[in-house]
Image (cartoon, helix red, strand yellow):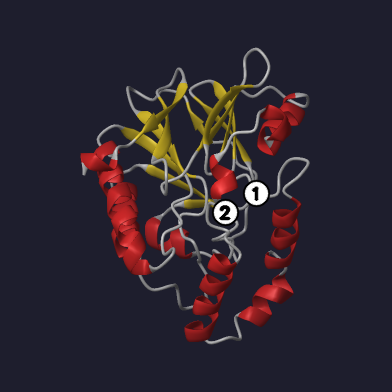
Amino acid sequence: MVRERPVICIFEDMKGKKIYFASDNHLGAPTLEASMIREKIFVNWLDHIKADAEAVFLLGDLFDVWIEYKSVVPKGFVRVLGKLAELSDAGIDIHFFVGNHDMWMRDYMQQEIGAQVYFNPQTFTLSGKQFLIGHGDGLGPDDKGFKRMKKLFRNRLAQWLFRWLHPDLGIPFARYLSLKNKLISGDEDLKYHGPEKEWLFQYAQRKLKQAHYDYFVFGHRHLPLELPVGDKSTYINTGDWISHYTYGVFDGESLTLQYWKPEND
């Protein structure tokens, strides 16, 4: 298991480079074949940004299911994994936040790609700006279902017991549960009901009372959002690569949401 350490990552002089944020690809859903189109679109985007990327932050649920055994990982995803390895080999920092769909990540991303893996929100200082970054599941006053699921799936005994299932049984079973419970973005995820219903926004408000952050950046919500939190703070949700194809770009001064049009491919 990856041993997580409190991290403050500092990019003081970005020298014209940019930092990119993306989340919630859910590759593999509803099937590997059906998600191949979205995977190719995302890989083309990664190829597009490599010319000016200082770092790439993947904010969770890159995969719809990721059950990592000691010596076995799920079949597929070679295009996106290969492209991430290419970026890492080129000196671009890859920061991978584990989401509720890929929370059984172990050390594959670190060993094979050179990514830094995080299991909880982290504070970063990027070009003098304070960021709080994470996937977003189980935060805020609600999201109780994900909190219960997170508690179960993070349980080491549950993980140990599940790994006694052969991968040919364990991985398809996990995919079945994911789709059966509609954990990939549903209709309600595509609607904005105001800040009082946005529990990640409320979480940002609470954290802002403890310390100043210029940006709160999360995924999980599947809806691109940019909301002011106080006078000098902003909550940004990076949306998804299922319906919106949105991502965040930080140029050293400000963080903005942008849209990648699939027809660009």
Badge 2 amino acid = Gly
Residue at (25% x, 35% y) in the render = 51
**In x, y percent, where is residue 260?**
32, 37
Q: Are the residues at dot 2 and dot 1 in contact (C-beta closer than 8 Å)?
A: yes
**Residue at image mark 1:** 137
How far is mark 2 from mark 1, CA to CA?
A: 7 Å
Which image quarter: residue 156?
bottom right
**In x, y percent, where is residue 70?**
52, 77
**Residue 228 position (above or below residue 79):** above
Q: Secondary structure at mark 2?
A: loop
**Residue 156 position (above or below residue 47):** below
Q: Residues within 10 Å of mark 1 (few under 14, many from 20)?
A: many
Depth check: 159 or 36 in front?
Answer: 36
**Residue 212 position (above or below residue 69):** above
Residue at the extreme top:
231
Taking the image as shown, residue 110 lies to the left or right of residue 231, namely: left
Badge 1 amino acid = Asp
Task: Name the disc covering residue 99, or none.
Answer: 2
Which image quarter: residue 205?
top right
